[in-house]
Image (cartoon, rainbow, N blue to C red):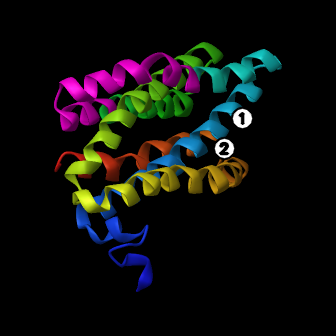
Amino acid sequence: IRMFSDDSVGAPLRQQIFRRIWLASLLSNFGSLIQGVGAAWAMTQMTTSADMVALVQTASMLPIMLISIPAGAIADMYDRRVVGLIALALTLGGSIALSALAYLGFLNPQNLLLFCFIIGSGMALFGPAWQSSVNEQVPPKELPAAFPLNSISYNIPRSFGPAIGGIIVAAAGSKMAFTVHALSFLPLLSLFHIL
């Protein structure tokens, strides 16, 4: 197939480890966007303040601004695999805690914002470790194609993730969106340790 030939953008997908981590990353990116919809909906159920609803996105994205540059340095100075696993564990722990609070009825606007920030921090820490580990997953000649594939693994979920999140929230509520998010990180966590 032409898509997987040596000079195609899909060539890195022939490498089993890259393909498996790429697919797991695609799944976790869907989970993150589903969680975003669930968090925004949960906030609208707890308060009528438009500012509080807007703060959900701020709490999720602020860590990217605050942590990404130091996270890049951390990924260069320390074992990327360990940094990635710590970041994924932080994200998964935050996701599980958010789900548990929602199911137990203890979710309030403040802890929703706190856990959105924790989850966002884990993802901001994970990004540079994941990006810099690509050269360990594919041969050097396939690196120029591997980096755009990583962007694709984020942009595909951006196109469909919020709609899927809306369907999940409409059908089963924000609690289910939080659970789906937590579950979406398990494949990535199970694979990233083998790098």
Q: Are marks 1 and 2 in contact (CB under 8 Å)?
A: yes
Decide which of 164, 70 is in the foreground and name it: 70
Looking at the rendered structure, which numbered label has been put on residue 107? Answer: none
Residue 15 quadrant? bottom left
Q: Residue at x 24, y 49 (%)?
A: 135
The residues colored magenta run 60-87
**Residue 175 percent location from the top left of the image:** 58, 39
Q: Residue furthest bottom?
A: 1
Return the disc, 1 or 2, that comes first in the chain's sequence: 1
Asked whether residue 77 is drawn in magenta, I would say yes
Q: How many marks?
A: 2
Q: Residues within 10 Å of mark 2 (few under 14, many from 20)?
A: some
For label 2, the residue is 173
**Residue 172 percent location from the top left of the image:** 65, 50
Looking at the rendered structure, which numbered label has been put on residue 41? Answer: 1
Please, what secondary structure does the residue beneath circle 2 have? loop
Question: Is 187 on the left or on the right of 27, as rendered?
Answer: left
Q: Main secondary structure of the magenta part?
A: helix
Decide which of 19, 164 is in the foreground and name it: 19
Q: Residue at x 31, y 62 (%)?
A: 142
Please, what secondary structure does the residue beneath circle 1 have? helix
Q: Amino acid at mark 1?
A: Trp
Residue 30 makes an appearance in the image: yes
